[in-house]
Structure formats: structure tokens, C-alpha cells
Amino acid sequence: MDALRDDEIDKIGVWGMGGVGKTTLVKQVAQLAEDEKLFTAGVYIDVSWTRDSEKLQEGIAKIQQKIADMLGLEFKGKDESTRAVELKQRLQKEKILIILDDIWKLVCLEEVGIPSKDDQKGCKIVLASRNEDLLRKDMGARECFPLQHLPKEEAWHLFKKTAGDSVEGDKLRPIAIEVVNECEGLPIAIVTIANALKDESVAVWENALEELRSAAPTNISGVDDRVYGCLKWSYNHLKGDEVKSLFLLCGWLSYGDISMHQLLQYAMGLDLFDHLKSLEQAINKLVTLVRILKASSLLLDGEDHGDDFEEEASMLLFMDADNKYVRMHDVVRDVARNIASKDPHRFVVREDVEEWSETDGSKYISLNCKDVHELPHRLVCPKLQFFLLQKGPSLKIPHTFFEGMNLLKVLDLSEMHFTTLPSTLHSLPNLRTLSLDRCKLGDIALIGELKKLQVLSLVGSDIQQLPSEMGQLTNLRLLDLNDCEKLEVIPRNILSSLSRLECLCMKSSFTQWAAEGVSDGESNACLSELNNLRHLTTIEMQVPAVKLLPKEDMFFENLTRYAIFVGEIQPWETNYKTSKTLRLRQVDRSSLLRDGIDKLLKKTEELS
């Protein structure tokens, strides 16, 4: 705090090992600075994406936008360098606090537009990292504060605060003190163990102490053996396979925020939630399991991405949830990946197809394709259930590639280019989730062969026409066509054939609805087709004119979540804050008296 008050110090560093409490500390400092009114404004920015060198440049734009949002600044320039000039000019007049947390590689502040000490009024930057040299030598921090393990007294105080006062009991206290000692003063270990042992019997505490003492050392770079033992123990004592599976899935996915919508798609495909009859039940189950992991300190809230992220999957299903994104502390993620990589899970992250043997026994494979241009003609993966390809727009997938993957349930081929889909896709009889987000797509008629498909996501793809074969997907529950701006043709009777569909997302997408009574066989779908979808509860859609809405028997009645935009709505007007949003433009009184709209108005929470 003294350094924050010192006008001669423009950059302050905080460093220490993973899990020692750097994020907690800088956030607390920001709160104290706000209480003392040291700055006119402040912004906290997680930059953990700096792990990945390829994301550094796009990350500059994220930092610029975050600061601009905090200042209420609307950029006029479109490229980063022009925006940097605009931002610098504004920041030279302000006294603000900028916190960049979890820095892994050099972030050039000049490229962002953050002025140096010589040409700014009072802008102060706080930087947090595991690496002191990065902060001092590369980032130019004038003063750096090391964050050490907690001393015994503070470790006990944090443990007791988390586990509850019952640890002060005569029988429990001596065991609890020994358990705290095993955590070696690391907050991330203390909090996870305290949460796991809260309200447990003395016998469970004694067993935990023995297991923590006998934990085998590991060789995970950057993860203390004691921390690994504590987190592994916390994982082992999660109650139920569902929550354990979700924990490993979150750890296996990429660093940074994970959307709840994406987690739902994957979990449904993997059938992680047993015996659920509806999408609504799956959502409730996911929210419940996420809360358990958060309560165990194994999962954190992600950032609110606001409206500045383009081509986002729908957030409508989780609009009322605590948070629409989750994330893992990087130490927890490293431990989760280590657990997941071993039998019986076999989660594998690969950088190179050369690592593959002719027959691979993995169940989950994530392949980073940034340096891969062609996959092998055939890969025998008889146990594979989940296949995720990353960063591969120029990647060629041979038509024979998916032979021998009969158990595959989830396939994510986002950001790929396809003239036609690989022909062996039809040989995936158990595929339940297919993601082709942000893809360049030609002929996708083959999708009609995937009879068990429950989730199909084409967010941000350049698809122009849905194939008539899609009408065969009678088990489809979730269809996400958000941001398919080029989609102009949905043949008649496709939508009405999707008899089990529960969620249809078409924001910033198809609007060429045919009028009622048009019987031309070549015409587009009309809205009355949605009346046949008796399970439909969630919809995002745009309708150019109110006259296109069906006059009676409207599907509106069963909706529990919706964002419906009627009339000439601009793209910026399609952002919304509630799960029952209705926007009407240029509609007259007689239109509003239609029975369907009348029912919708009665339950709408956000009306424009």
C-alpha cells in the first residue's frame, strides 16, 4: 500500500509460486485502494493466456478493451496500434490502477497503450507472476514483493476459518494441526483440504492425515509435491463419479475460461449425467456439480465476458446461473491433468501426431494442430470417446480417418475448413455431440447419418444452407446456429422433424422465414413448424416482421427461456440481460393482441 501511494513508483510486482495467494492479495490491494480513493478508477485483468505465445497479440486487444470499458471509452480505430494511441491519450489524463494478474511472458505495455512513467499523470500498474525476473527485468517493475508460504499461526487461522470452529475440539485439534502442517503454509492446499474435511468424523481426519503423509512425490513442473498430495486427496474424496468426471473434464480443457454452455454440450455427449430425461435436468445437474467443485475450492468463477466477444455460443441456458463461465487455478488444472492422464481415465493432450502408435488406447484426446498439416489415413482408437482438434484450419483430415472409433461420443472440429465432411463420419454410430463452430463448411449432408446426435453446434460457421438430411436427426436436443450470418436457407419441414428438440439458438443468424400459407416446395421454413416441437423450451431467434409469426397455436406457451427479436433489429440490440427477453420494433397494436404474443408478454422480464 505504501508503494501504491508513492508517486515515484509506477510499476509494482508481486511474485511467488503457484497457489501461494497472489491473486487474492492483488484483489485485496485493489479493494483497499478503492476504499482509500487513491485512484479515480481501477481494473483487474487476468492475463493467464500469456502462457500461449500465439495468443499474445490477440490478448493485447483484450487488455485494451477491458481498460476502455472501465473508462467508458469507445474506440474509433479498428487496429491495435490506433487503439493504443487513443488509450494512451486518455490514460495520460487519468489516475487509475491497472492490475495484470498471472503473467507468464512479456506483455508490451506500450503496444497496449499504457503510458510510461514519464508521460502519464498517475497511472499505476500492479503485475503478478511466478517469475521475479520477468517482472523486474522484462516488465520494469520498480518494486517487487515476494509472497511466501503462510507462517504456522496464519496457516492455522485460514484453516480454521475454512473448516469451522469444530477443529478446536479436544479430539480434533491435535489431528487438525498435523493436517495443516502437511499443507506447508500454501493457501491453495489449506483451503481445499479444509473444505474437504469440514464436518467429517475424527476417523476421516485421521485417515486423511495418514494419506497425506504417505503421498508419493510427483514431478509436475511448478507444482509442489505437498500441494499435489492435498489436491489429489481432495479429488479422491469428492462424492460420486459424476463430480469427479466433471472435475477431470474441466482440467483437460484448455487454459482460461470455460463456458457452461460448452461444458453442457460435452457432458451431454459423454453421458456424464446418468438417467436424465431432459435438457433442463442436465442443466440443473451441471449447475449443482459446479457448485460442489466451487465449494471444494477446486473450481473458480470465470470472468464475465460481457458483450464484446464475437461469435459466442448461446448463454441463454445459463443466464440465471451464478456464473456463465468457470475456470481452474492453474495449479489445480496441472494436478487434474496429471490424474486424468493415468488409467483408467486416459485423457491425453498431444502436440504431434507422430506420438501416436498404430493403436491408441486413450479415451480422450486433445490434439493441438498448429504445426500439423495432415492427419494419418487411419487411426485405430477403439476406446476413444472424445476427440478435440485445436488450431487446425489448414489441417487435412483423410476421409478414412474416423474408421475404428466406434465408441466416439463427442467430436469437436471447430475452426476447420471442409468442402465436404470426412466420409467415415457416418461410421460413428454413438456420436452424440458434434461441434463445428467457426468452420468454413460446404456439403454437410452426411450429418443426417448421425442418428444418435443430441447436440449440434455450428456457431459462427459460414454455412449457407442446412441440408434436408438434417431432418433425420430425431434425437437432437440442442441446435446452436448463433452467428451463422450467411445462413439463408432452411428447407421446409426440417425443423418440424426435430421432434425432440429442446433448445434452438439462432441469434444473428437465419431470418429468411417464409410467410404462412406459402406451399411452394422450394420455400424456406416458416415459424409454424416450431409448433410441432412439443419439447421446445429455449429459443433465441430473429424475425424480420411480426406478420411472419403464426396466428394461432404458437410455440411460445411452453418457453421457459427465450430471447426473441421481432422487426428490423440491429446487431448491437441483440444483447440481453435476462432469460426472458422480447424486443419488438415497429409493431402495431393489433399485432400485440395476437394470442401468442400476449402470453409471451405476460412472462417477459426484459421488454423493449
Image (cartoon, helix red, strand yellow):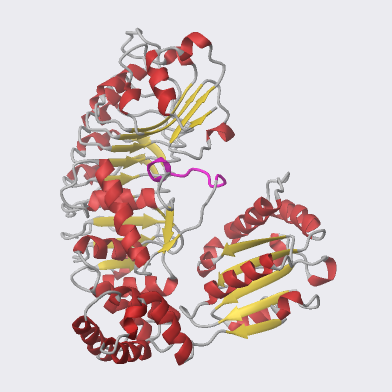
Q: Position of residue 502 (x, y in %)?
A: 28, 34
Residue for point 56% across, 65% down: 47
Q: Is residue 48 above or below residue 214?
A: above
The part of the image, by quadrant, that contains residue 107 is: bottom right
Name the image quarter holding the C terminus.
top right
Q: Position of residue 289 (x, y in %)?
A: 29, 58
Please give left or right for residue 12 compared with residue 500 in the image. right
Residue for point 62% across, 67% down: 31
Q: Nearer the viewer, residue 489 or 340?
A: 340
Please give left or right for residue 426 compared with residue 436 in the image. left
Q: Is residue 185 above or below residue 374?
A: below
Q: In this view of the protein, can residue 525 be seen by the observer?
A: no
Q: Position of residue 381 (x, y in %)?
A: 19, 60
Q: Is residue 521 magenta?
A: no
| Magenta region | 307-318
Please give left or right for residue 471 compared with residue 109 in the image. left
Q: Is residue 481 above or below residue 321?
A: above
Q: Magenta segment, principal secondary structure? A: loop
Q: Nearer the viewer, residue 227 or 418?
A: 227
Please give left or right for residue 400 compared with residue 254 in the image. left
Residue that sits furthest to the front in the current view: 170
Q: Nearer the viewer, residue 15 or 590?
A: 590
Q: Position of residue 37 (x, y in %)?
A: 73, 65
Residue for point 20% across, 42% down: 426
